[in-house]
Image (cartoon, rainbow, N blue to C red):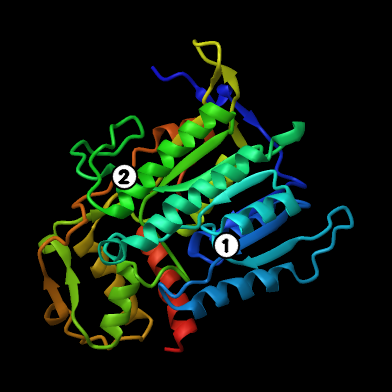
């Protein structure tokens, strides 16, 4: 049976901590910032984002405005600031070093990355620059945060991805599975993050936790994701393409459940211990953040189209069948994603609570309001 490993973790109180969130204008990053301000007293957050145009920058600005609206009126005389946003890239080593030097973050949540499986096939340089060089810069800054006997970074939490499971046949995907067969450059860069983090945790005693996210969706999400693309195209009267002839399953995970998981993990740090070699054992962990319930893509589309009709965004007699095209699998894709979250549930009490129909309903309501339907 499993040993309850939460006993092996150190619990830290997030109140009054200084937190660096990279990718702070991104879907997960912006929601995390807002949730931390809502729930953690006296927290100070530095947000870093390069605001690139991989997708609509207006959406990133919208997320940042929502953060700024939330912190208006927040008063706490014990903190120097609540929120600092810095436009820049984690691939800029000097900038990263300056942020660590000026703000000395207690906790780092690295969500900045070039995302997207298919985009990595046509734009590989972006992935190496952000996901490899950028992550290396974060690790180096964490390493040097302990210089001259300073306390330094207490916990590095970073985004990995369900894409690392690649061609694995065993379902559901467990963090104990070997992940040596990525099928995209994006997946390979995320596996490299886990390897680099382990090496730095071992060498420099940096407590680090990697989170493998599974198909995150919700209001103000990423427009390159299937649910967003399907909605755009259906409302424009265009066809939607469903890959692998409809034989795809995805473990869609609602944004609130993802944020809850990150916040739980932030406060539980892999313990620094001695290894059997007498040296520091790597204070390192990896967890799945998923819904633990894959949905067939055709069923997912049926729920989405029903909601678009119920919200009067499409007519009740809309001919959905004529707009659905079943097409072959795309390079870099996999047919199924399914998270085993036993470890995450055991160690943090993580339980996703949002069913797909509720999550999609919230997205459709947001979409209707944001785009003025």
Residue 232 falls left or right of residue 271: left
Q: Could you say which quadrant of the image residue 149 lies in?
A: top right
Q: Could you say which quadrant of the image residue 7 lies in?
A: top right
**Quadrant location of the C terminus in the rendered image:** bottom left
> Distance between the Cα atoms at labels 1 and 2?
23 Å
Figure check: 267 above or below 277: below
Mark with earlier residue (1, 2): 1
**Front one among 184 and 130:** 130
**Quadrant location of the N terminus in the rendered image:** top left
Figure check: 230 above or below 32: below
Give the residue at the far front of this rendering.
94
Residue labelled with disc 1: 24
Question: Which of the numbered marks, if any, corresponds to residue 164?
Answer: 2
Query: Label 2 crowding class (10 Å Cα cut-off): few <14, some 14-19, many 20+?
Result: many
Disc 1 + disc 2, Cβ < 8 Å = no
Helix, strand or loop at label 2? It is: helix
Query: Label 1 crowding class (10 Å Cα cut-off): few <14, some 14-19, many 20+?
Result: many
Figure check: 158 above or below 35: above
Residue 318 falls left or right of residue 225: left
Report x, y in % for residue 202: 52, 27
């Amino acid at each position: 049976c499993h040993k309850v490993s939460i006993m092996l973790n150190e619990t830290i109180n997030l109140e009054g901590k200084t937190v660096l969130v990279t990718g702070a204008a991104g879907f997960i990053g912006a929601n995390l910032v807002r949730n931390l301000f809502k729930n953690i007293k006296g927290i100070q957050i530095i947000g870093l984002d390069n605001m690139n145009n991989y997708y609509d920058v207006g959406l990133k600005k919208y997320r940042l405005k929502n953060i700024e609206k939330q912190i208006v009126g927040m008063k706490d005389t014990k903190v120097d600031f609540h929120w600092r946003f810095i436009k820049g890239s984690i691939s800029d080593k000097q900038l990263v070093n300056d942020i660590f030097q000026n703000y000395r973050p207690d906790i780092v949540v690295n969500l900045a990355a070039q995302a997207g499986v298919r985009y990595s096939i046509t734009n590989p340089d972006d992935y190496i620059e952000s996901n490899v060089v950028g992550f290396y810069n974060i690790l180096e800054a964490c390493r040097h945060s302990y210089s001259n006997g300073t306390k330094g970074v207490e916990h590095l939490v970073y985004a990995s991805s369900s894409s690392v499971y690649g061609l694995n046949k065993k379902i559901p995907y467990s963090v104990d599975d070997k992940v040596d067969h990525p099928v995209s450059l994006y997946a390979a860069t995320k596996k490299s993050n886990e390897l680099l983090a382990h090496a730095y945790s071992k060498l420099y005693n940096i407590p680090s936790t990697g989170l493998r996210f599974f198909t995150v969706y919700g209001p103000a999400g990423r427009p390159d994701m299937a649910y967003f693309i399907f909605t755009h195209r259906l409302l424009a009267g265009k066809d939607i393409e469903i890959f692998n002839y409809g034989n795809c399953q995805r473990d869609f995970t609602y944004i609130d459940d993802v944020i809850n998981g990150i916040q739980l993990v932030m406060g539980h740090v892999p313990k620094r211990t001695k290894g059997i070699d007498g040296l520091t054992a790597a204070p390192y962990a990896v967890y799945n953040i998923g819904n633990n319930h894959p949905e067939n893509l055709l069923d997912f589309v049926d729920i989405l189209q029903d909601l678009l009709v119920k919200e009067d965004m499409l007519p009740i007699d809309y001919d959905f069948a004529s707009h659905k095209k079943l097409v072959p699998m795309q390079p870099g894709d996999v047919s199924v994603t399914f998270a085993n979250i036993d470890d995450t549930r055991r160690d943090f009490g993580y339980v996703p609570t949002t069913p797909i129909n509720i999550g999609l309903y919230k997205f459709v309501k947001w979409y209707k309001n944001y785009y003025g339907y």
